[in-house]
Image (tube, rainbow, N blue to C red):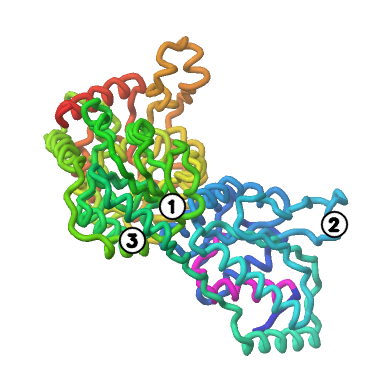
Amino acid sequence: MEFATLNALHAAVLIGELALAGVKRAVISPGSRSTALARAAVEHPTLQTYTILDERSAAFFALGLSKADGAPAILICTSGTAGANYFPAVIEAAKSGVPLLILTADRPTRLRHTCALQTMDQTQLYGNFTAFFADVPAAALNFDACFWVRCLARQAFDAATEFSAGPAHLNVPLEELSEFSADESRRAREVWSALQQTASTARHAAATPLAQEALAETRKRVDTSLCGLIVAGPGAAAARGEAATVFHLARKLGWPLLADVTSGLRFFDEPSLPFYDVFLRAENFASLAPDAVLHFGGFPTSKALANYLDHHRDAKTVRFGREIDRGDPLARDGIFVEANPADFCSALAETIGPSRDSLLLEPFQRAARGVREELSRPVGDDSPESEALFVREAVRSLPDAANVVFANSLPIRYGDALLSSEDGMRDVFALRGVSGIDGTISHAAGIAAASRKPTLLVCGDLAFLHDLTGLIAAANYAPTLTTLLLDNNGGGIFHFLPALENEDQTLFEAIHGTPHDLDLSATGALFGVDWSSLAHPAQFDTTMAASSGRPRVFHVRSSRGQNYAAHMTLIERLKKASGA
């Protein structure tokens, strides 16, 4: 290896160690101070690199890359406010347990607090939202300095990829350096050679030990239950192997499984019970009380399910997940177990014998069956204004094993309410860590780029406008991305909030409706994506299969008020079909 500068040597050591640890991809935000880091990533033989102009878009794109296969992506940016634009994605990664490795180039430490240009204090830039932070020492042309950089890189990787994963941040101060002399080049080669002959600092993160006391307590609650229930919230199963163990336990217990659309358990070979967001709105089902609840993953998307759990909070509850899942907004009485669901479910299933089905199973199955039969009727011309039906038909029209990415606000709620395993195997993603709308397109583009699978993003117009630069990333790196754009000219979700029903309409529109009155179709030509308008859900049968080899948008215009009325009519019809 030849190195032109000391920065190039240290950057190669840092990037090389992260690649050796298991990093596959790096996202670069252009800048001058970060040149050595960017070049080291581009020149590394095993790294796939992406250059994205907008730092906020780059960060959410990297988040999507990391989600697609669990391997943390590297983020590289220059000094100053560039790294601050990563913050929303860092928060989301922290709150959803997604590994990320952030490398912020910095001015030399001696320039801090001197008012030097493009210089600020970048230490602990992301506060307590990172699993690891280090201010990398200044580069030096000796083995010990380079080895310490290597150790910090490995520590950051290990922290990001442990069971309670999240982002790790290395701040990298870099001097403006002249090129090496011939003697310095020789010494740099010697240092690099010595590093290659040194054993890796790798360590394997230890699995969280299975808590035997928690296992015994759970077994006791299971054995005494007559009306048991399993809830799988967002992120409950990170892989299909984990999902299989939860299903095995549910079958052995005979308990109903209510799986969030982002849980990893909704779209599976053997279905869980879908449509609970519909039938739990009915009093005759909402009053059926569980006496024990096993809750995997985060807090559910469905307000109907959340209300149900809150109403029956006296049920003996055991919650499982990572440290980020510990908090419970319902303040239920119970225990929390930090454990991999696969390990815990397998151990629990081995300790229990044949048991009678939960008394909740049959009525919940009957309700789900009624909703399914009603939804199976062809989409008629009487309810084209319901955005939810566009979502359902778009997902059903995808090839098997495709990705679906839901934006927050209404899209995720439509999917959670109406989709089931009968719609095909799907890998579902959403930004549910803090449930924001920033970075929506970029996040989906990252998932599509890393997986290279057909990927459907379901997105509202405000989230779309909030991340328009994400279309640049999609055009450059995500040709398999399709966006279903639900354009109701503003904040459609606020029509669903009872507290705002009687608000003065002028004030409502100014604060909540926030119409933008833009013709969004112009973005198709601007960003190089195919653009089509749809008027009816049935059109997906003839449009989803076609592909031009570049991203595309299916644009659905709707009226917020009419969509609300049509959706509530649909829900009432489905509730009645459930046996309410």
Identify which residue is drawn at 48% across, 36% down.
465
Q: Which residue is mark 2?
A: 111
N-terminal of the pair, mark 3 or mark 1, is 3
What kind of residue is marked 3? Glu
For the residues labelled 3 and 2, the Cα–Cα distance comes to 49 Å
What kind of residue is marked 2? Leu
Identify which residue is drawn at 47% across, 41% down.
328
Inspect this view and state whether residue 452 appears.
Answer: no
Q: Which label was assigned to residue 242?
A: 3
Instruction: Locate the C terminus and report the quarter of the image it occupies.
Output: top left
Q: Nearer the viewer, mark 3 or mark 2?
A: 3
Inspect this view and state whether residue 105 appears.
Answer: yes
Q: Which residues are magenta?
A: 7-27
Identify which residue is drawn at 36% across, 61% down.
344
Q: Secondary structure at mark 1?
A: helix
Residue 445 drawn at (x, y percent): 43, 52
Mark 1 residue crowding within 10 angstroms, few (<14) / some (14–19) / many (20+)? many
Q: Which residue is mark 1?
A: 445
Residue 223 drawn at (x, y percent): 27, 52
Marker count (numbered):
3
**Image position of 160 with respect to 117: above or below:** below
